[in-house]
Image: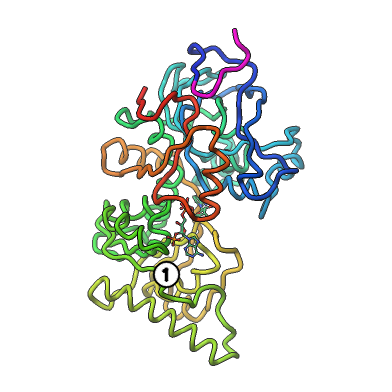
């Protein structure tokens, strides 16, 4: 038996080599992804009780591996070492599709040879809060796979808990199947998980970054439930992509310059200029809708640059729901607009098992396009992350071929 197989080569089913290739981040390389991420060899991880070893065929690219590469705002390697981890490296990757290669003790719902997609939420099913009925993604034990945990999907093999395995939609190529679950499930929870603010027919929904990974999924899911998505972009060449997915209209954020933190109310002139900018942005939404209606839900993730605008343009008694802060964390909220207009600012993170399964079903039934825009070979893992870091990547989701020998393969 060979000790290591080249990416794209398949060892015989069930044969677990001692070593594997992995796209690794090390603290001494923290910085832009093209410098921080390198393909190295390391030992294939052990499979514990309730766990599954997956041969990764393709893995999706997500923003969290950029945060991991930068070593900021969290040093994920040091954080784990403080909790006793021995590894001085990080293997990212929170999305993936592959083949069950080995199963640990007690695994009953998947078997060797099954084709699966991997969901990125990890929790302790025996945690006290989960046993008391908490949504597992709100549990104190919840972690994002391949960010807060090591041994993500940017490697020939990854280890997951059994509940992270979902049947691979048969009609999808490996690269499609590995690309969508993190983004799609995150926005599914944002749009469907926070009663009573779930998308209803006729609801206008503002989608920041409409051409990005989250945005491309959100536009479609809003449409799926009868809502009216309005997408924001920065590059006019992405307008067509958003309209094709179902956006009622598109706003180019470069037409405005009021972004970032709110000027102090004591600086009357600066505050008035800011207010004029944010009102002009809101008017653009009314123009698209053809009536003076404001978004009942605002799908947030840029953070510092956009939260003040999101909170202002959100309808009375509506919800701004955020899962990220690409542009910065110190976002201002003018509390007058929050309480007087009785709005809700809701945090949302990841998804739970039923939400993961629901979006996988939507994709399997052809009702949600995974919007795969770019497929790269394993050795381009640093480069594709660099593109995303510089916001120069194409709209939709991107995938890295690892075990799949070529694009277009489904089994
Ligand atoms: P993405 O594919 O890069 O898309 C993000 C989009 O945001 C970009 O296409 C860009 O669109 C827009 N954007 C960037 N900077 C902006 C700014 N300053 N103001 C307004 N818009 C801006 O990334 P993604 O996968 O959608 O992820 C987006 C964020 O969500 C990341 O920070 C990620 O870490 C976070 N996230 C969180 C979770 C969670 O569970 N908590 C899950 C997934 C993602 P335009 O330039 O066209 O406007």
Coordinates of residue 175 in the picture (x, y in percent): 41, 33
Residue drawn at point x = 49 percent, y = 33 percent: 377
Figure check: 101 above or below 135: above
Residue 263 location, quadrant = bottom right
- Identify which residue is drawn at 53% across, 86% down: 271
Q: Residue at x 42, y 45 (%)?
A: 397
Q: Which of the pair 45/132 is nearer the observer?
A: 45
The location of residue 221, given as percent across then percent down, is 32, 51
Q: Residues within 10 Å of mark 1 (few under 14, many from 20)?
A: some
Image position of 9 with respect to 332: above or below: above
In the picture, which quadrant includes the C terminus?
A: top left
Indicate whether residue 294 is drawn in magenta.
no
Q: Is residue 302 left or right of residue 33?
A: left
* The quarter of the displayed image where residue 244 is located: bottom left
Residue at the spot 62% in from the left edge and 42% down from the top edge: 148
Q: Looking at this rendering, what residue extends furthest in the top direction?
A: 1
**Boundaries of the magenta span:** 1-8
Task: Tell me the residue that label 1 is attached to.
Answer: 253
Query: Magenta segment, principal secondary structure?
Result: loop
- In this view, 279 is above or below 304: below
């Amino acid at each position: 038996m060979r000790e290591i197989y080249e990416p794209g080569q398949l060892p015989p089913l069930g044969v677990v080599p001692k070593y594997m290739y992995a796209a690794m981040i090390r603290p001494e390389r923290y910085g832009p992804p093209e410098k921080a991420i390198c393909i190295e060899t390391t030992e294939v991880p052990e499979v514990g009780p309730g766990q599954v070893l997956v041969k990764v065929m393709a893995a999706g690219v997500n923003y969290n591996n950029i945060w991991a590469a930068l070593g900021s705002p969290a040093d994920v390697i040091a954080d784990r070492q403080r909790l006793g981890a021995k590894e001085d490296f990080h293997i990212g990757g929170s999305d993936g599709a592959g083949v069950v290669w080995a199963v640990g003790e007690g695994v009953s719902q998947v078997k060797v040879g099954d084709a699966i997609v991997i969901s990125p939420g990890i929790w302790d099913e025996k945690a006290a809060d989960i046993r008391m009925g908490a949504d597992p993604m709100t549990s104190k034990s919840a972690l994002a796979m391949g960010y807060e945990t090591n041994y993500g999907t940017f490697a020939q093999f990854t280890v997951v808990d059994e509940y992270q395995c979902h049947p691979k939609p048969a009609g999808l190529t490996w690269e499609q199947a590995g690309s969508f679950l993190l983004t799609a499930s995150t926005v599914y929870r944002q749009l469907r998980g926070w009663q009573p603010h779930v998308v209803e027919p006729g609801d206008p929904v503002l989608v920041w970054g409409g051409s990005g990974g989250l945005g491309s999924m959100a536009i479609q899911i809003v449409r799926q439930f009868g809502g009216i998505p309005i997408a924001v972009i920065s590059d006019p060449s992405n307008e067509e992509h958003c309209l094709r997915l179902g956006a009622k209209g598109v706003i180019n954020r470069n037409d405005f310059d009021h972004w970032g933190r709110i000027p102090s109310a004591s600086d009357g002139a600066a505050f008035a200029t800011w207010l004029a900018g944010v009102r002009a942005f809101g008017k653009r939404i009314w123009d698209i809708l053809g009536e003076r209606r404001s978004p009942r839900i605002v799908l947030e993730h840029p953070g510092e640059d956009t939260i003040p605008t999101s909170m202002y343009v959100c309808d009375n008694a509506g919800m701004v729901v955020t899962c990220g802060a690409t542009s910065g964390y110190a976002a201002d909220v003018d509390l007058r607009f929050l309480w007087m207009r009785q709005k809700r600012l809701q945090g949302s993170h990841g998804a739970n098992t039923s939400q993961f399964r629901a979006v996988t079903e939507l994709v399997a039934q052809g009702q949600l396009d995974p919007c795969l825009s770019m497929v790269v070979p394993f050795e381009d893992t640093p480069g594709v992350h660099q593109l995303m870091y510089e916001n120069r990547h194409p709209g939709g989701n991107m995938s890295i071929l690892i075990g799949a020998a070529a694009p277009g393969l489904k089994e």
